Amino acid sequence: MPDQGTRLRLPGPTAALARLSHRLEGHPQARAIVHRSADRALRDLARLGLDLNALRIRPGVPAPAGTSIHSIPVRPAQLVAVRRPVAAFDLEPAGVAGLAERISRGYSRPADCLLELGGGRFELPSGFISLGGRLPSQAIPFLYFPHGHNLLPALRCLYGRATTVGDGILIHLPLAWSYYHWLCEVLPRALIAAAHAPELPLYLNDKLPPFVFESLRHLGLHDRCVRLPAGVYEARRLLAMSFERAEWPVPEDLLRIRDGLAALAEPAVKPGGEAPARRRILISRADAIDRRTANEDQLLDELSDLGFERVSLTGLSLAQQVRLFSVADMVVAAHGAGLTNLLFAPAHCRVVEIAVESHLGPTYQILTSLLGQRYGYVRGEEHRRDVWVDPGGVRTVLGALDQPAPADGMAAGGALTWPS
């Protein structure tokens, strides 16, 4: 159990900044302005020689005095193929279209390893890891670091007063609070690390979302979990999986989680022998603080004769989301974590993503490609923090996804050999 007598005590200015950061979560426009300002300040400091990246421990570099770090290989580096979108409604030659073209060339994944740290520290709720006043590079999933939003957690991890805990495995890596990153990247790593050292407890923050604990319970890891409050912790022996290149999943990881959680869905055939009805889903973000579809009612009217229904995922358990998407025939949604549930949709599912410039990401083109689903996108126009989409463009892309094409006969991912 943690020694609660050495809980982290933040100095006044740092604590004030932490409180400000928390308050900004409900104000996306102000949050974006503050983070952009912080990013500019960090770049200016880096030019003056004050760059937090200088504190990284690169692979092969000796650990700081009084500590140790060992990398245990788990799987080699690999190349992952990605299919092009089947169709797109996009009048701009760059931006979303440019990213889709680049991703269609595939991507590389670094070798994964299990890090064994002697005297390692970790900060919650961020999941940052430090060792002797340095940051192991293999545990930083951000291509550009630091950002304004992760500077304070990194500094707390490096210099905050720590609570001592016993030997254990940190499964709360950065981004674990995100539905996508947890299911597709962090949870698969947790399974690997837990299997390597079955005698050790699993450390994670007690404030993570319910889907985290629901998935751990279903996969048989819940009883090994030790939930810790926010703070900085130190262990004589700390294990954690490497976590580089976020948003670039490993194909076998996706299959492992999909198959491991498949039992949460209702049976494919009902007791009377009748298959469950297929559903066509328009995922609504009407209750979100940003990236809402400004003309969602108009879009639903355009798609209503195709059998689409509006669904909000807010408040649904992991099991309810798995069951919903297990019978999805078509899905239309703005870029967001809800599309992670395509992991549980059948291979025949057709997907239209409403994409915008301010949230460019390859996530769901990759996911649908690796799972064999047909994918297209429509470029939305941003209106403040919301998005306007051409309903006719969405319908056109859906029609294109229904057309037979040679790509239907390709293996998922185009050049990947999937395990049986």
Image (spheres, rainbow, N blue to C red):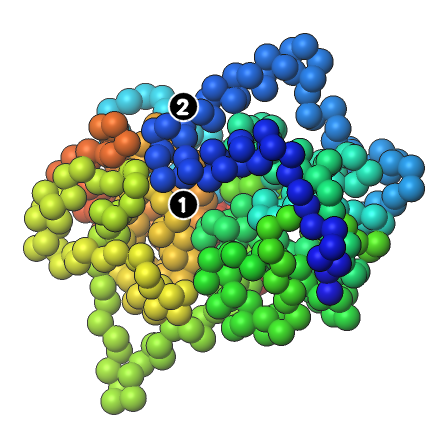
Camera sees residue 73: no
> Where is residue 106 shown, x and y percent of the image?
52, 38
Residue at the spot 55% in from the left edge and 67% down from the top edge: 216
Quick one: SS at disc 2?
helix
> Where is residue 317 shown, x and y percent of the image?
38, 66
In the current view of this chain or complex, which residue is farthest to the bottom? 272
Do the numbered discs 2 and 1 sit on residues whose CB atoms are within 8 Å? no
Residue at the spot 47% in from the left edge and 33% down from the top edge: 20
Crowding around mark 1 (Cα neighbors within 10 Å: few <14, some 14 to 19, many 20+) is many
Find residue 88 and name its label: none
* Amino acid of disc 2: Ile
- Viewed as shown, does residue 253 lie left or right of 65? left
Residue at the spot 44% in from the left edge and 43% down from the top edge: 363
In the current view of this chain or complex, which residue is farthest to the right? 66
> Where is residue 58 shown, x and y percent of the image?
77, 33
| Residue 14 figure quarter | top right
Residue at the spot 37% in from the left edge and 24% down from the top edge: 95
Find residue 364 and name its label: 1
In the rendered image, which residue does mark 2 sit on? 33
Crowding around mark 2 (Cα neighbors within 10 Å: few <14, some 14 to 19, many 20+) is few
> Where is residue 4 shown, x and y percent of the image?
71, 57
- Viewed as shown, does residue 140 lie left or right of 214? right
Position of residue 241 relative to residue 89, above or below, is below
